[in-house]
Image (cartoon, grey):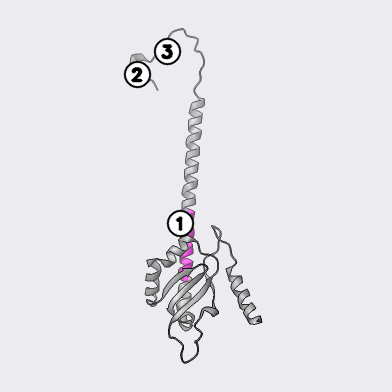
Amino acid sequence: MPHMLGAYRQVMKTQTGTSGADAAALGLGSVLVGSLPAALMTEGAPDRYTVEAVFSRRPEQEEVTAILGDETRDYLTKWGYRNVEVTVSDRRLEIANTNLEELRDGLAGVLADRLADISAGVRTTREIAAARFADAIASEHDRATAVTALAESVAFTTTGSTQAHAPDDGRVHA
C-alpha cells in the first residue's frame, strides 16, 4: 500500500498548478504506470501501446486544439514519429502507437518541446489580443475626451447684439 500512495502523491503533485494568463508552460509530469499494459517486460508484451502521461496543469482549450491539430501531427512526423498519435483526456496526454523506450529515447523531449511551443503561441496570442484591447480602450477614451472637450467649448451666452445671427448666404462658417 505505501507504494500506491507514493505514486498517488507523485501524480497529485504534477496536477497542481495554475491556469490562465500567468500559468507556466504546459508540460508533462509523469507516466501513469497503472495505465500501461500488464504484460510489459514479459514475452507477451506488445511492441507498441498507449502511454498516458499527466499534464503539469490543466490544458487551456486553445492548447488542446493545438495538441490535436495538424501542426502537431506534422511536427511528430518531422521528428520521425509518424505513427504516434496523441489525444487529450482531461489532465492526461494519451500517446498511442509508442512504447516507454521510444519515449525515453527521444519522443518525450519532442513532445515536451511541442507543448512548450504551443503554450508560448497561446500566451503570445493572448498578449496581442490584450494589447489590442488596451489600445482600443485608450483610443475610445481619447475620443470621448475630445468629444467632451468640444461639447464643453460650446458657450450659450448672449453676444450683446440684437441682430439675428445667421450665416451669410446659408454657408456654415468654421
Judge whether 3 appears above or below 23 on screen.
below
Circle 2 residue: 171
Mark before the other along the chain sequence, 1 or 2: 1
In what quadrant of the picture does the N terminus appear?
bottom right
**Main SS category, magenta section:** helix
Residue furthest to the right in view is: 2
Give residue 145's position: percent from left, percent from top: 51, 34
Location of mark 1 (residue) = 125
Distance (Cα) linking label 1 and label 2: 51 Å
- Identify which amino acid the numbered label 1 is placed on: Thr
Q: Which residue is mark 3?
A: 165
Q: Residues within 10 Å of mark 2 (few under 14, many from 20)?
A: few
User: Whole-Å distance between the Cαs marked 3 and 2?
Assistant: 12 Å
Give the total number of marks visible in the rendering.
3
Q: Which residues are magenta?
A: 113-127
Q: Secondary structure at mark 3?
A: loop
Instruction: Tell us which disc is closer to us: 1 or 2.
Output: 1
Q: Residue 46: within the magenta? A: no
Q: Residue at position x 49%, y 91% from top?
A: 42
- For residue 173, above or below residue 92: above
Residue 125's place in the image compared with 174, above or below, is below
